[in-house]
Image: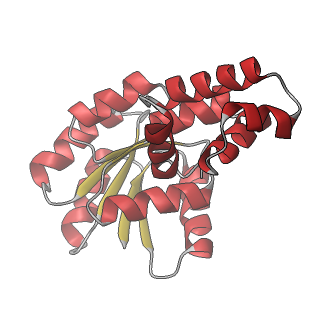
Amino acid sequence: MKLLLIDDHPLFSVGFAHALGQVASGVEVLTAPTIQDGLNQAAAWPGLDIVLIDYRLGDTDGLAGLRRFGERFPLVARVLISGDEDPALAQRARAAGASGFLGKSASIAALLAALQRVASGDVVFDDAALRVCRAGATARQMEVLTLVAQGQPNKRIALELGIAERTVKLHVTALLDALGARNRTHLLVRAREQGLL
């Protein structure tokens, strides 16, 4: 996978490129501090798979960068990365032509997995998983999710965890809401898609 990271913070760029190289073989990473530098590098680097653009850039914002790359290199997958992990920003990135939106708080393994999905033609807008990890992924809710995945009914989950059945229902409802799932079966599908199971 050939990846171009556009980020005007040298420490993040160098650290990201180094960390990615440590966990993945066969990944080449170039960095650029501006959209224009990135466009120049992309033109000189045939076979580029993904451009990963930071949302906050000194000369412009990443959304404008997504559009500029789309006009010049329509076959290169575009992904927005940001420390601002707002689901509304993820939707704006999608509207600007991105194939994905990643939060900087994600682990390097999670970022790599997401980038590999994009490289294989998938789209990655895991804002639901980000919300769960930030707001709902209490240890207890993850325990409930694991037992739901084992096919356990609420009563059995309550007995196993030593909590009230009503509390189990509250945890399941919170997980359904956070992952945008319609029912327990859909919850498990969404949880697997987001790498929570």
- Res 138 visible: no
Residue at 23% across, 74% down: 47
Q: Quarter of the image holding residue 51? A: bottom left
- Give the camera-side residue of 59 and 53: 53
Q: What is the basis of the colouring in this image?
A: secondary structure
Question: In screen coordinates, is 154 left or right of 120?
Answer: right
Q: Position of residue 118 (x, y in %)?
A: 33, 58
Most extreme residue toward the right is 162
| Residue 128 drawn above or below residue 189 | above
Residue at 53% across, 38% down: 129
Q: Position of residue 45 (x, y in %)?
A: 25, 72
Q: Position of residue 111 (x, y in %)?
A: 52, 55
| Residue 5 drawn above or below residue 141 | below
Question: In screen coordinates, is 152 left or right of 103?
Answer: right
Residue at 37% across, 73% down: 1
Most extreme residue toward the bottom is 26
| Count of marks, rendered view | 0
- Give the camera-side residue of 22 and 91: 91
- Give the camera-side residue of 92 and 36: 92
Question: In screen coordinates, is 8 left or right of 118?
Answer: right
- Res 180 visible: yes
Q: Position of residue 173 (x, y in %)?
A: 58, 22
Q: Quarter of the image holding residue 18? A: bottom right
Residue at 59% across, 52% down: 197
